[in-house]
Amino acid sequence: QKEVEQDPGPLSVPEGAIVSLNCTYSNSAFQYFMWYRQYSRKGPELLMYTYSSGNKEDGRFTAQVDKSSKYISLFIRDSQPSDSATYLCAMKETSYDKVIFGPGTSLSVIP
Amino acid sequence: DTGVSQDPRHKITKRGQNVTFRCDPISEHNRLYWYRQTLGQGPEFLTYFQNEAQLEKSRLLSDRFSAERPKGSFSTLEIQRTEQGDSAMYLCASSQPGLAEQETQYFGPGTRLLVL
């Protein structure tokens, strides 16, 4: 079993839809949780950064962490074609630790 | 542009050749990380520096791989005797220690390596 699991998709939704992306993990020592967006042939770009359990909202993006279930989610409201990318969940044990990534979910938002 | 930069962006080489990649982190960042990403996978950690000290190396980093950060600024990653399995995107990231909740790794655009 990999440390971080993520449905690879591809996920295709119409413009304006609400998108839900999810990851599960096995290492209970993870405390810092992130979502990165990666466009084709580019480096990952940080979208959301959360410490421990709870929700965090930033514009159209909401990140949720449930440490008791070892489950994290990213919601995208009013999805746009420019949101089409691969979304990588990521986590680490300490603030300065290496980041462990999920395999990524490919998202296409159709106009 | 004050982000992380990597050079070259693309490299094609023949099996058995040596290659070297360079990463220039964000100027005030003292931590620098190397990751490798293959198609359809997330980045995998290779090694990390704090200033010039290499503090951790993954078991993925075989003896053919060496990384340096001689002056605590830019870093190089060298692969000797390349193999086709080395074909991947090599990503560099940097971060600056601060409040625990705020330390974030910022990624460069990557160097895409193809070994023929």
Image: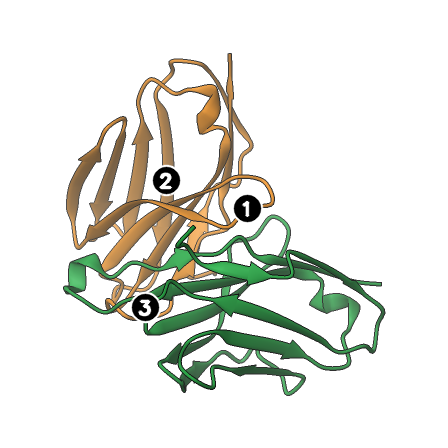
Q: Which mark is residue A42?
A: 1
Q: Amino acid at mark 2?
A: Asn
B26 displayed left or right of B19: left
Mark 1 residue element: loop
> Mark 1 Cα within 10 Å, few/some/many (few <14, many 20+)?
some
Q: Amino acid at mark 1?
A: Lys
Q: Amino acid at mark 3?
A: His
The answer to whether marks 1 and 3 mark residues whose Cβ atoms lie closer than 8 Å is no
Q: Nearer the viewer, mark 1 or mark 2?
A: 1
Q: Position of residue A15 (x, y in %)?
A: 44, 14
Relative to A31, residue A80 above or below: above
Which chain is depicted orange?
A
Q: Position of residue A4 (x, y in %)?
A: 41, 56
The answer to whether marks 1 and 2 mark residues whose Cβ atoms lie closer than 8 Å is no
B80 displayed left or right of B27: right
A104 displayed left or right of B106: right
- Output the chain of dot 1: A
* Residue at x 18%, y 54% (from the top left corner): A51
Q: Give chain B's shade.
A: green
Residue at mark 2: A22
Relative to A23, residue B14 above or below: below
Residue at mark 3: B29
Mark 2 residue element: strand
Disc 1 versus disc 2: distance between alpha carbons?
A: 22 Å
